[in-house]
Image: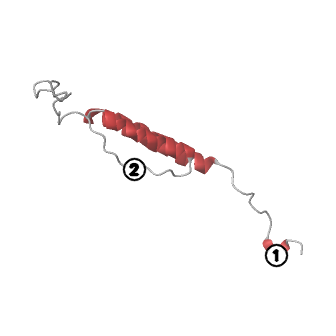
Amino acid sequence: MSESVSEAEIGTEEAPAYDSAAPAPLNVPRAPTGNADVDAQLDRLADTDHLATEGHVEVYEDVHRGLRDALTALDARPGPPVPTGHPAAAPR
């Protein structure tokens, strides 16, 4: 028993038309930096994959602000204590 399907029955659904103006993912790889704040901002860049070009500026400005805040936070972290006194006066 052979089941044949006519060509008219195959492919009755049309493929959606390609819209060159539609947003298209850039698929730019983003490697983790090891800094959670920075990585979160870099991940936010993926939002531009789903936005029209006009929407990119808002995302870029937001990411820039977040990266600047992360950099500022690095400056605010306390470092090792600063030695006091003259090194020659240190006990041996």
Per the image, label 1 sits on a secondary structure element best described as helix
| Residue 51 visible in rendering | yes
Front-most of residues 56 and 21: 21
Residue 49 percent location from the top left of the image: 33, 38
Q: Which quadrant holds residue 5? A: top left
Work out whether 39 lies above or below 50: below
Residue 77 percent location from the top left of the image: 65, 49
Per the image, label 2 sits on a secondary structure element best described as loop
Front-most of residues 50 and 81: 50
Kindly identify which residue carries mark 2: 29
Kindly identify which residue carries mark 1: 88
Work out whether 86 lies above or below 15: below
Describe residue 26's horizontal placement relative to residue 66 as left or right.
left
Q: Which quadrant holds residue 84? A: bottom right
Residue furthest toward the front? 1
Residue 15 percent location from the top left of the image: 18, 30
Q: Residue at x 35, y 48 (%)?
A: 28
Describe residue 23's horizontal placement relative to residue 72 as left or right.
left
